[in-house]
Image (cartoon, rainbow, N blue to C red):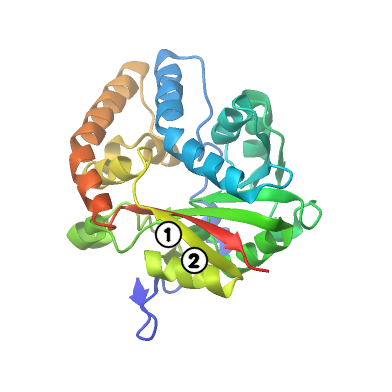
Amino acid sequence: MVECTGCGLIRLFPWPSPAELEKYYPPAYWFAPGDSLGERLEQHYRRFVLRDHIRFVFDALGHAGGSGRLLDVGCGGGLFLGMMKERGAKVAGLDFSPDAARVAWSANQAPAVAGALELAPFAPQSWSVITMFHVLEHLYDPMSYLESARQLLEPEGRLVVQVPNAACWQFLLFGENWSGVDIPRHLIDFRDKDLDILLENAGFEVLRHKYFNLRDNPAAMATTLAPGLDPMARRVRRAGESAAVKMLKDALYLGLIAASLPFTIVEAMCRAGATVMVEARKKP
């Protein structure tokens, strides 16, 4: 990890090649619901903690007006889109992975396509809100995604972006062991000010910040303290587990999330949360 002496931006150096990076995104990188008791419980938990995202994005839809159409970039298995659709939103998703797009269609009845945003088959000015949750830090060229989003947004359109916040207390405490660094998948480690500058340069006006959400902030600390318990990390590493072991690890991880909650609330109140979510307006 290196830090620019001019602007202070932190990134990996050198970046891994796309072929190398691909090895760290196995087919089960996103969450897809299954039939086991543990997977059903995980589905209920994920629906519960996503409510922060739902409220934030519905506020953005209300501000944007226009067609009310929502595009989620990096939609994964589409649970967020499915929940938005249940509440009456007009939604679609985009993801690099064809398998993820299929899961979004089949498991959450959310229309989704596979591909990069620069090549997405959408007309200019066809979306009221575009969301990117934990996408920009994975990209070699995040500016190209923001410029594409600006072209796709309606005149009063809103962009909602969330990234790990390298200005958080967790990073100060744990350094390179903080889960938000996520080497080598995270190519760039944004501070909130870095994200603001990037958005401004891409033709957006930043309207508001949110430094806490229930899904990501406590989980970031829990994963930092016990990476071997993180369900996503276990899927990425293809850990072979019996159903009983999986349930036990999931229960321990949930307990650690609950124990991390007070600290993550306090750091967010001080505008130093482990994530930052931004609503930005497309400039004329």
Q: Label 1 near label 2: C-beta < 8 Å?
A: yes
Direction from residue 126 to residue 175 in the image, left or right: left
Residue labelled with disc 1: 184
Residue 206 appears in the figure: yes
Residue 140 appears in the figure: no
Which residue is rendered at x = 35% and y = 85% of the image? 5
Q: Which mark, residue 16?
A: 2
Which residue is rendered at x = 65% and y = 33% of the image? 89
Q: Earlier in the sequence, mark 2 or mark 1?
A: 2
In x, y percent, where is residue 140?
55, 67
Q: Residues within 10 Å of mark 1 (few under 14, many from 20)?
A: some
The type of residue carrying mark 1 is Pro
Quadrant in which residue 84 is drawn? top right
Given residues 232 and 244, the one toward you in this image is 232
Which residue is rendered at x = 35% and y = 75% of the image? 2
Q: Secondary structure at mark 1?
A: loop
In x, y percent, where is residue 168?
27, 59
C-alpha distance separating marks 2 and 1: 7 Å
The type of residue carrying mark 2 is Pro
Q: Is residue 84 positioned above or below 157 on the image?
A: above
